[in-house]
Image: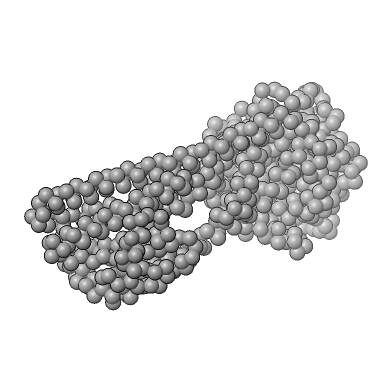
Amino acid sequence: MNEEIIVSERAARWRTYAIAFLITALIFATAFWASVYFNDRRIAEVRSAQDNISIDILSLETQFDLLAAHSCRDISENSVLSREIHPLGEQLSYLETQPSVNQEALRSLKRYYSLLQIKDLLLMQEVSEKCGLKPIFILYFYSNKGDCENCEGQGYTLTALSQMYPQLRVYSFDYNLDVSALQTLIQIRNVEGSLPALVIKDKAYYGLKTTADIEKIIPELATLKKATASTTSQTR
Amino acid sequence: MSGIEMTVTYTLLFVALYFEIFLLVSFLEKRTGRQVIRPKTQDAWLPSTCIVVPCFNEEASIGSTLSSLLALRYPADKLEVIVIDDGSSDKTLAIARTFETSPQVRVRVFTKENGGKHTAMNLALANTEAELIGCLDADSIVEADALTRIAQVFADKKVAAVTPGLHVWKPRTFLQHIQNVEYRLAVFNRFVFATLGALYVTPGPFSIFRTSVVRELGGWRHGHSTEDLEMALRLQAAGHLIGNAPGAAVYTLTPEGLVGLFRQRIRWTYGFLRNAVDYRHMFMSRSHGNLGLITLPAALISIVTALYFFMRIVWETVSAVLETYARVQLTGVFPQPSFELFYVNTSAMWLLVVVATSIIFGLICVGSRIGTGRHFPPAATPLFLFLYSFITPVWLGIAVVRVMFKMGVNWR
């Protein structure tokens, strides 16, 4: 189909301009609507995951209460919970960078996430006490208000540590989040506003701590490394 | 993204998308038969035509160019070919002279000191009595019926110039295949611009002009090394019409490598920008219709848009690399890349970029259909869509710098 020859007067037809404008505006509106829709879907996905984790925690607590020390083996072996909670933190961090996210819904998810982490922390502490385990916890307090220069770097360090030592449990909390249980935790642990802050073995550390610094604070990590290496070699 | 950044990004995206949609709507309006003046074609009426072949060291291609002109299906008594050797130092002149004895068409060869394409065209203009005059660069060849298709349009007295359907001659290299796609998009653009009466370039290969109008306007000018663009703007400024005959196929040799491509495109962009300054009175001028209101401003804004998004991509890439480097330095661990549906970018900006790219794909398809009758675009289309966004801004940026510092450009 070769088109025929074209010659035309160049006078502008306002109708063409108006139709093009309407279609463009419609496409823009659809793009913004779709972006909000996809983010809402993500929020729903995170909320659903959080609900599942909440049920898992409740189930573990109940199981532990019912069977007391008899369930030590079951619970200490159950590391699934931490593995489920951690990706949620990453997903929430991602949602925080998205411009078209419902901020109220996101804040609600973050509060929920903090509560789940506290619940998991308390449960693990109880299990450790009753079952004679010595798990390693790190509580990490950060701020994303733009007043914590080293928080991003500290986050990377802890992510790397979690990958190196899967048994290490890192709980991260937004210091400024309006959750009373979190504020109580901050008070109990005597964490001041100088961020980033890490609480390791009941002691607070302030400022950026590198992988080496943390390995020095927690010498037991070396044992975890050996255990991991030995497990890996056995499974090969 | 900050508030200002977001405003600039979405404004430029809106303008780019608006322009694409505008072209599509105009094309559809044309297809439904509105707005266009259809020239009354009279097969018997074919004006005398002079085709000028300006050449400078074109020994490799001058023979094929002239042979394609001699093979034109056009009354021999109404066609003449003038070869202007613009001071070649190779065998161009000798090869051209062998065509002077052609029994089919009158071929004349002139030689002169090197002075640029516009001087070659003006020498031919001074030596012809033909009603139409056109140029065929010595790196291009024409299809046999191309001139007949174009010449008929001049039956409309208001038409001062007609542009052909321009294609890449036998694409061979990777870059030529990408340019082949670009030329298909240009076929569409030229077609719709003609529909809007808003063409602002009469490409060197086989654009044909009404000789009397060119004389009236004072012949060709240097036009900042883009005499084809300057002439089109001058014609438009004087109120003449420029048409397009997409079926008049002309094939041109395109740069094989990046150096040649960059040199050519820097010259084109530089020429556009300098001529845009010279003809600034036409921008946003209602008296110049669609040309002043949309095609010229859009051409200018597209340069700004390409540079802005390129700088954003470069900035974001550099930031990401530096961040990863700092992260690896800090942790000693390289972040593991992974794919999860959750993290697929669905921001409005990216969705709009996808829509805009899809529309360009559609325009290339239409360009292919208009220009070649084929239903599918060239196979290199995805490469064009992906790679050209990264290559184009580089020559645009260099051209802008050259304009700002008045550094000029060279043909070769």
Quarter holding the C terminus of chain B?
Answer: bottom right
Instruction: In this rendered view, identify the residue nearer to me: A121 or A30.
Output: A121
Whether B408 is drawn above or below B121: the answer is: below
Q: Is residue B210 above or below residue A230?
A: above
**Please, is residue B329 above or below residue B26 in the view?**
below
Q: Residue at x 42, y 59 (%)?
A: A176
Q: Residue at x 43, y 62 (%)?
A: A143
Q: Nearer the viewer, residue A199 or B154?
A: A199
- Toward the viewer: A155 or B123? A155
Where residue A218 appears, as percent x and y from the top left, is 26, 73
**Residue B136 found in image quarter:** top right
**Quarter of the rendering containing residue B65:** top right
Q: How many marks?
A: 0
Quarter of the rendering occupied by the N terminus of chain B: bottom right
Residue B4 is situated, as x and y percent measured from the top left of the image, at 62, 53
Residue at the spot x=18%, y=60% of the render? A126
Indicate left or right for A121 with A19 as reference. left
Judge left or right: residue A67 versus residue B47: left
Res A117 seen here: yes
Instruction: Give coordinates of residue B348: x percent, y percent.
Output: 52, 44
Colour approach in the figure:
one colour
Would residue B295 appear left or right of B18 to someone viewing this image?
A: right
Left or right: where B282 falls relative to B352: right
Asked if one can make out residue B151 in the rendered structure from this viewpoint, the answer is no
Q: Position of residue B296 (x, y in %)?
A: 74, 44
Residue at (21%, 72%) from the top-left corner? Answer: A220
Residue occupying the far left of the picture = A70
Q: Toward which corner of the image does residue B312 lie, by quadrant?
A: bottom right
